[in-house]
Amino acid sequence: MNFPVIKAVSYALAHTPDLVPYGSKPERELRKEPALYERLVAHSRTFDQACAYPPHQAFIGHTSPEALWEKETPWWRHPDVAAKRWGPYGEIMPEAEFYGLLRFSDDFDLVWLDEAFLPAVRQQLRAHPLFRTEDLDRLGDGHALDRIQSKIAHEGALPLRHQDRIVGCVCRGHDEDPFLTANILLENVACKATGILAIRWLFEHHREEGVRPEAIDYVINAGEEAVGDRYQRGAGNLAKAMAERSGCVNSTGGDVKAFCCGPIHSLIIAAGLVHAGIFEHVLVVGGGALAKLGMKFRGHLKHDMPIMEDVLASFAILVGPPDDRNPRIRLDAIGKHDVRYSGSAQSIAQALIANPLDALGRKITDIDRYAVELHNPEITEPAGSGNVPRYNYRTIASLGVMRGEWPRQAIAEFERSHGLPGFSPTQGHVASAVPYLGHARDAMRRGDLRTAMFIGKGSLFLGKMTNLSDGMSFILEAPKA
Amino acid sequence: MKLAGKKVIVLGERDGVQGTALSECVKAAGGEVVLTVNQCFV
């Protein structure tokens, strides 16, 4: 049977060390202990350090994730000497340009940039391949610094800092609405901006293959940010806002909320829409999660490491009709963690991995690579959160042992033979399996990979509405598999 | 560890062992679960 295919994938990072204090954890800790700010600044990474960080180079496609296994650790002490800002899947954007992108993405004059800072930003974006003259016009002329400082001092605006000085602010959207504060609007505009960046890279890199913004019928935003005001908190549709600034003039869209599992839900829904013939091209996008910046900074300070959660990450994935060049999503073998399943590791593995394999009559070892929650362990382990991908691979290997398809004594080896190292920034939904999709697509098009399973999980219990967790999975197959 | 007759606070984690699964084990061992909390540390 013909199934929808992954036609294009892109990823982007924005290095935003001066936004780390606005991450949820740092913001709360700084309120209790303002002196922490100096320590945060002292442990921040330069752009060159963030760019040369090997997992970031894998994220934007310069190296394969598997190549990280051969790199000396800790990766942060061993920069990639061949690192580049621009990658096959996107880029790593410096902070000043990102502030320009924020301003570009703002439709309500919320982002004010210092008129003395703006010309340099404009010049940098003029040299950027994704921004045209009409885009740069949206930057405006900037504001006098004393007006920005007055906004910060008297009107609830949030300062934007860069290299030890205030270069702008984010204004609040309402005098009284607790869901339109400057902090929340920054979180939402940052998500919108990074999503736009990923979408624009997707079109830029796949133009020759005929992937055009005008061809997109529907956009699904898979991110977790709650856009809305006091009467409709989290009402969303950031998807359409991203589409507007990405040239997708023939599309509408909507958001799929499912915690970190949002991208897998979204891809399956997107494939369903294409398979049913309702839409021809559906774009799934996930923007960066400002709230997650600096989440584990205490652990990094304790180990005298740089603050590793200093990048906003985003992705865009285009699902299209069947062709013979791109890998296809097997819609006849979708894994889903139904309400009836318990939260035990065995039950989750049965629902997400065993059931889809059984639907196709396959064994654990028939899948070449499993993409799980791909959080970078170098970020999580210093904070005591362990190696998340490794936990997951041991669970899959254990399922293989129970099914008589994997040797008990080789459980630890499954990670290398069928898994991946964690290489994604800990950006919530962004890290949920999809960072491997671009690599898998390329490997399948080259003939180096036959099948991969993408497994996402969601922590629904964090919202205090159910004790359930969630998960979904799908199998991707090479064009000629 | 004997859990029979003891009150137990259960802390679970999404990618480790979840609270609901731990709670079932505690109950099976005769313990009384007074609180189950799940966290996600990433």
Image: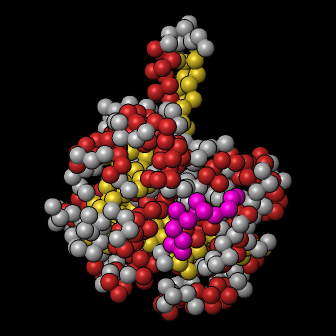
Residue A406 placement (x, y as % from top left) = 40, 41
For the point 46% across and 53% down, the residue is A417
Whether the magenta-drawn stretch holds residue A66 is answered as yes
Q: Residue furthest top?
A: B5
Q: Is residue A388 above or below residue A161?
A: above
Residue at horizontal 51 percent and vertical 33 percent from the top: B17
* Position in image of residue A95 (x %, y %): 65, 74
Identify the coloring. secondary structure
Q: Is residue A298 visible?
A: yes
User: Residue at point 61% right, 52% down?
Assistant: A377
Taking depth in this image into account, of B28 and A131 the one nearest to the observer is: B28
Residue A292, x across and y down, in percent: 60, 55
Q: Is residue A454 magenta?
A: no
Residue found 76% across the figure and 57% down from its top: A305
Q: Is residue A116 left or right of residue A178?
A: right
- Residue A150 is left or right of residue A59, and the answer is right
Q: Is residue A260 above or below residue A159?
A: above
Identify the image quadrant of residue A112: bottom right
- The range drawn in magenta is A61-74
